[in-house]
């Protein structure tokens, strides 16, 4: 029996460490494989969102700067409205179109008072301000869409990986009891399998946390641009339509 045990241990060592990470994953139990599969889904969806939102926010920022140049160079709102379709990725376009629509409705709805006035006038700057604020809220919601999944991934996947690790360590203790030995050769393969889930959880969580914080800061920049633009729009309307 004593002469057979080293041979069994050597065979276990050779089989446990062959194949690298893929081999460890292949020999994981059902729970470990499910945890890895779940972490892989989180990671793939997170990376898809990261790429998509990176492109979308980059376009939004670039087109917002272009829109501001066009807006400040134009002498009529109708000229700005004509180029909005080319810059629809910018959240400023949504804010401008809401304000432009409200101004037109107020000017055209003035009736005889508007006809008697030497120039078109708006009846309520407060109503215009509310329209701009409502449009800005819609644009912020659109920019923040799907970012919550990155936050969820960053906060949940480390614990999912930890659960896989705890489960793997429990299996390791069971193997120790079955083999009647706590030799490193017996313990190491099980511990390695267990720690893979921790590494998987961190691999999913770290990029999600980094890009969530980065994209949130980009959204804040665009939100500030919308607030400034709304004030600028109100100032122009107040000077020219009141």
Image (cartoon, rainbow, N blue to C red):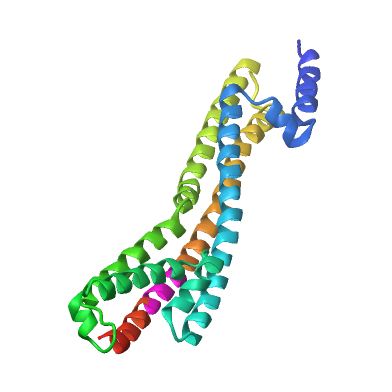
237 lies left or right of 17: left
Indicate left or right for 153 with 200 as reference: left
Residue nearest the viewer, comparing 180 with 139: 139
Rendered-image quadrant of the N terminus:
top right
Residue drawn at (80%, 21%), measured in percent from left and top? 11
Q: Is residue 107 above or below residue 172?
A: below
Taking the spot 53% from the left edge, 29% from the top edge, the residue there is 167
Residue beneath the point at 60% across and 38% down: 40
Task: State the image quarter where residue 194 is shown.
Answer: top right
Residues 190 and 128: in front is: 128
In this rendering, would 23 be left or right of 73? right
Residue at the extreme top of the image, as rendered: 1
In percent of width and height, residue 123 lies at: 21, 77
Q: Residue 2 in the image: x percent, y percent? A: 76, 14
**Where is 172 relative to 125, above or below?**
above
Which of the pair 79/11 is nearer the observer?
A: 79
Residue 132: percent from left, percent from top: 32, 70
Q: Which residues are magenta?
A: 220-229
* Residue 101 in which image quadrant: bottom left
Q: Is residue 196 visible?
A: yes
Which quadrant does the C terminus fall into? bottom left
User: What secondary structure characterizes most of the magenta part?
Assistant: helix
Q: Is residue 202 visible?
A: no
| x and y, in percent, of residue 119 in the image | 28, 87
Closer to the camera, 122 or 196? Answer: 122
């Amino acid at each position: 029996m004593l002469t057979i045990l080293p041979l069994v241990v050597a065979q276990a060592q050779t089989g446990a460490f062959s194949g690298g990470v893929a081999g460890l994953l292949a020999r994981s139990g059902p729970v470990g494989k499910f945890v890895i599969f779940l972490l892989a889904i989180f990671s793939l969806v997170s990376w898809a969102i990261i790429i998509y939102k990176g492109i979308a926010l980059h376009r939004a920022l670039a087109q917002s700067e272009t829109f501001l140049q066009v807006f400040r160079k134009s002498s009529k709102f109708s000229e700005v409205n004509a180029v909005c379709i080319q810059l629809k990725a910018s959240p400023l376009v949504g804010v401008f179109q809401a304000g432009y629509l409200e101004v037109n409705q107020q000017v055209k709805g003035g009736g005889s008072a508007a006809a008697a006035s030497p120039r078109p006038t708006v009846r309520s700057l407060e109503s215009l301000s509310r329209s701009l604020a409502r449009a800005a809220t819609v644009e912020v919601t659109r920019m923040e869409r799907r970012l919550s999944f990155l936050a969820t991934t960053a906060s949940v996947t480390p614990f999912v990986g930890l659960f896989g690790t705890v489960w793997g360590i429990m299996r390791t203790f069971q193997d120790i009891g079955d083999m009647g030995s706590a030799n490193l050769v017996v313990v190491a393969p099980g511990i390695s399998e267990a720690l893979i889930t921790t590494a998987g959880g961190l691999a999913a969580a770290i990029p999600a946390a980094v890009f969530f914080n980065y994209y949130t800061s980009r959204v804040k920049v665009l939100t500030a641009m919308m607030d400034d633009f709304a004030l600028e729009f109100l100032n122009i309307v107040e000077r020219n339509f009141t």
